[in-house]
Amino acid sequence: MTAISRRTALTAVPFAVATIAYVGTFLTHYDRLPERIATHFSFDGSPDGFMGRASALWVGGALLVGLGLLFTVLTATAERRAGTRLNAAIGAGTAAALGYPLVVTVLVNSDTQGAAEAQMPVRHVAALLFGGLLTGALAWWLSGAKPRPAPAPAAPSLALADGEAAAWSRTEVSRVLLLTAAAVTIAGVSTAAFGAWRIGLPLLVVGLVCLAFTGVRVTVDRRGLTIASTLLPRPRLALPLGSITGAGSVQVDAMGEFGGWGYRIRPNRRGVLLRSGEALSVRTTGGREYVVTVDDSTTAAGLLNGLADRHARERD
């Protein structure tokens, strides 16, 4: 089975199981349900939303089938966008998180004199969240990571004479992260301004923290490679010349190879990724590879190789 087929199956099967479980449970309890059943519950477990018995069966079944088809199609057609593994995980988690409360809703309405008697214990909320996360994580693990690409070939070393100074620096900004951070920050300020500071303050903090990581400055000079936020002095990543064995330019797939954006950690691999595309790849003496998305990475790699070669000569 190919990776895309396996991930499509991991998306479709949980929805199929959830649909069968819901419809099967509903039909076997159909005569034990009141004509109108409770379909939504408040935080204390009491019902605050109702629906006809037959309507609830059709709406719940259609919701599971519709979302199942949507996530399955997204996974099956995402092969070239490297989103299949993430879609499979989110789809499977959604199936569990939605299927569980639908089945429980049928059970808590069974054998009641009326929908008002149904109660939804709070423990079921924790169960659906845990079940959704666990199912999504399992689908992520079973779908398998994208094979790690071959190490980038080292860029041509820029010859530098002893004592010659050279440096390269470029700033990389993610517009998507910038807009997202700005939207969250504005939402936090607006929410706090209307008095809901318990919601607005966390949003504001998250927005400001995200804003600090929307841009990085990548610098290659006599100290080695430095990657730092454009707004804050910390955190920063610094690789001294003595630890560098080679550098090259690669094309990186942020989602497919690292599972997302930002600072990413993989076995023997680290990434500072604000997008997919051109990136600087640096290998160290410890056998680890560092990847940072930045334009003109070939120039940066060549200079870094030249600086590292000269540093090695000076040590000898």
Image: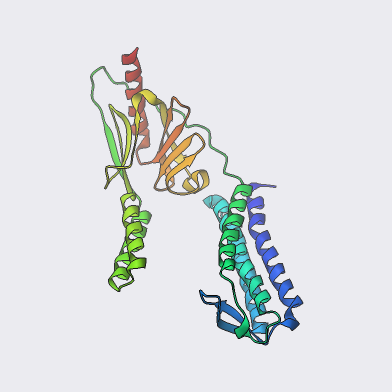
Number of callouts in the render? 0
- Residue 113: x percent and y percent? 67, 87
Residue at image position (55%, 50%) is 80
Locate residue 101: give its quadrant.
bottom right
The answer to whether residue 47 is seen in the rendering is yes
Q: In this view, does 160 lie above or below 271?
A: above
Q: In this view, does 160 lie above or below 110?
A: above
Asked where in the image residue 303 lies, by quadrant, the reply is: top left
Viewer-proximal residue, 189 or 124? 124
In the image, taking residue 226 as reference, residue 119 lies left or right, namely: right
From what the image shows, is residue 219 above or below residue 50? Answer: above
- The quarter of the picture where residue 189 lies is bottom left
- Tell which of 33 and 315 is nearer to you: 33
- Is residue 85 positioned above or below 309 on the image? below
What percent of the width, then of the height, locates residue 94? 58, 63
Q: Is residue 73 visible?
A: no
* Quadrant (top left, top right, bottom left, bottom right) of the C terminus: top left
Q: Position of residue 55 (x, y in %)?
A: 64, 83
Front position in the image: 138 or 214: 138
Q: Is residue 209 left or right of residue 76?
A: left
Q: In the rendered view, how is the structure colored?
A: rainbow
In the displayed orientation, state which residue is furthest to the top: 316
Measured from the top left, where is residue 63 in percent x and y?
61, 72
Residue at the spot x=57%, y=59% of the render?
Answer: 130
